[in-house]
Amino acid sequence: MNLHAIKAIYLFEMARTWRTLLQSVVSPVISTALYFIVFGSAIGGHMAPIDGVEYGAFIVPGLIMLTLLTQSISNASFGIYFPRFIGTIYEVLSAPISYVEIVIGYVGAAATKSMMLGLIILATSTFFVNVRVDHPVWMLGFLVLTAVTFSLFGFIIGIWADNFEKLQMIPLLVVTPLTFLGGSFYSIDMLPPFWRSVTLFNPVVYLVSGFRWSFFGVSDVHIAVSLGMTLVFLAACLVAVWWIFKTGYRLKS
Amino acid sequence: MQPILRVENLSKVYEGGFTALRDVNLELRQGEIFALLGPNGAGKTTLISIICGLVNPSAGKVEVAGHDIIADYRAARAQIGLVPQELKTDSFETVWATVSFSRGLFGKKRNDAHIERVLKELSLWDKKDNKIMTLSGGMKRRVLIAKALSHEPRVLFLDEPTAGVDVELRRDMWRLVRQLREDGVTIILTTHYLEEAEEMADRIGVIRKGDLMLVEEKTALMRQFGQKRLTIHLNAPLSAIPAALGGHGLALGADGRDLVLSYATGAGEAPVSNVLRGLAMAGIAYNDLETHQSSLEDIFVELMREHA
């Protein structure tokens, strides 16, 4: 294993976070704080508790998940797309480094950044609402699993995209709507039966549900189902990345 | 002695059917400078890209220091440094950070002393904390070379390294390349400046339409294909070449004031002394002599024309 190379890619990617601290960290934290103010404090004060959890606290796992998904995807997709765009990818592809090591470097850095943000948002939420974490190990487990899975997904988008529009297309047109409709701000039990059934086809439901269970011990679907669905998506992303490197798709001719 | 680079029956057909390389065979010795010449689209960059792992070969085999570039890619690639043709650099990183990154990427432990030495050799030391975006094109080219040398490669590919750079940088690069050769680094150079290849290379390869037509020692190539021309400026014009000078292969200039003798570079002194002796015997006076030796560029142009 070329540990020096993994470290080089990881630190190179993390350096971009520190260089663009305002964009990378401060901006998502402020956006999420606004959600807490509007949905948690202002509107939430007029909402009845859901499954015995105050509405302001109820949305915390969903908001963290929203940031985790969007940031994992955007960090990882940009991380691999930009070297392709400016041509510096030649150096990574000609280095004595395996595909697995390349993925660990890029995806590891993207996942680290989004997990940092997730934890910062969790800390921020305590200023606005009373939040508790019943199963901290599970919470961290879901945090890591989701960040890695969606960073892999972002890596795939970064390889697939051949312009900046495509880079933004999936996160904006697919991931964000799925997250908003995936129970981030409500329990899917609140939906009519038909829409509840439709919602079960949304993979984000399982992520939010499992993550929320780790906080409050309540969930829309069983924790095992949440975990299973997340692992299925992780496996699908791993297979796609394996295929990309096996075929050299968009990387080698 | 084992070659540092061995290419066997290498072919590349791109999707769409374009054949970029046809059955290329090549062996390079450690510590030589090899100039790969060819017109645009000849296959130079494809050959380099396959060896460096950027393009998949369609057929054939490549070994670097005895390591197969596919089966044993880690060991093979660790030996190679690549300076690409285009200026592909980061913008927001500092010179120091990007060169250090390259060293790590190639699996080498941090070594600040080595990075410092490379930056100093390339006159980049005072720019080490500058962001790359603030550098001139020539300086960015130096950064690319520094990145390629950061992991101490045994084989260095310079793909059009002096394209668009000023004379000073070109001379600096030549000096560096010679120094690297003395240190045992094998250098593969592609260039459009044939005087550069003539000045630097130990051996020359000529590639055209994916065929490596010729690989030859530079001096042997110059001797084999080179021509010399002797021009004799006469005191008085001649209307025709005198019979006494027949058989020397002389030609008369347009105004009758010049006699021109063309002969092979490796022919020695005989043709010249024979003609001069003939002139003396025929009583033809001359006031000046001028010789011209064909350059690598002349030879290259001639080879391209022959195989067109």
Image: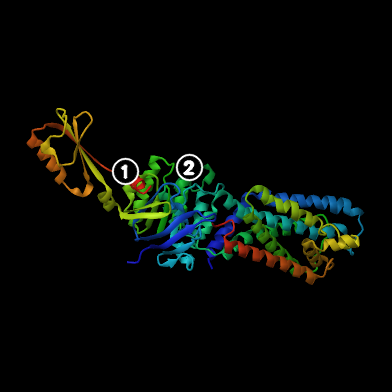
Chain of the residue under label 1: B
Left or right: where does residue B61 sit relative to residue A40?
A: left
Q: Are marks 1 and 2 on the same chain?
A: yes
Q: On what subunit does the disc labeled 2 rest?
A: B
Left or right: where B76 falls relative to A177: left
Q: Which corner quadrant holds the N terminus of chain A?
A: bottom right
Instruction: Categorize mark 1 by other alpha carbons within 10 Å: few (<14), some (14-19), many (20+).
Output: some
Give the residue displayed 65% in from the left and 58% down from the top: A156
Q: Where residue A99 sits in the image (x, y, percent)?
A: 57, 64
Quadrant containing the C terminus of chain A is: bottom right
Q: Residue at x 78, y 51 (%)?
A: A33
Q: How many marks?
A: 2
> Cβ–Cβ below 8 Å for labels 1 and 2?
no
Tell me the element at label 1: helix
Rendering coords of residue B223 (x, y %): 25, 50
Residue assigned mark 1: B298
Quadrant in which residue A212 is drawn: bottom right
The amino acid marked with disc number 2 is Gly
Residue nearer the viewer, B12 or A17:
B12
The vertical placement of A118 against A27, above or below, is below
In the image, residue B132 sits, relative to residue A199, either above or below, namely above
Q: How is the image coloured?
A: rainbow
Q: Which residue is mark 2?
A: B137
Q: Which mark is residue A25?
A: none
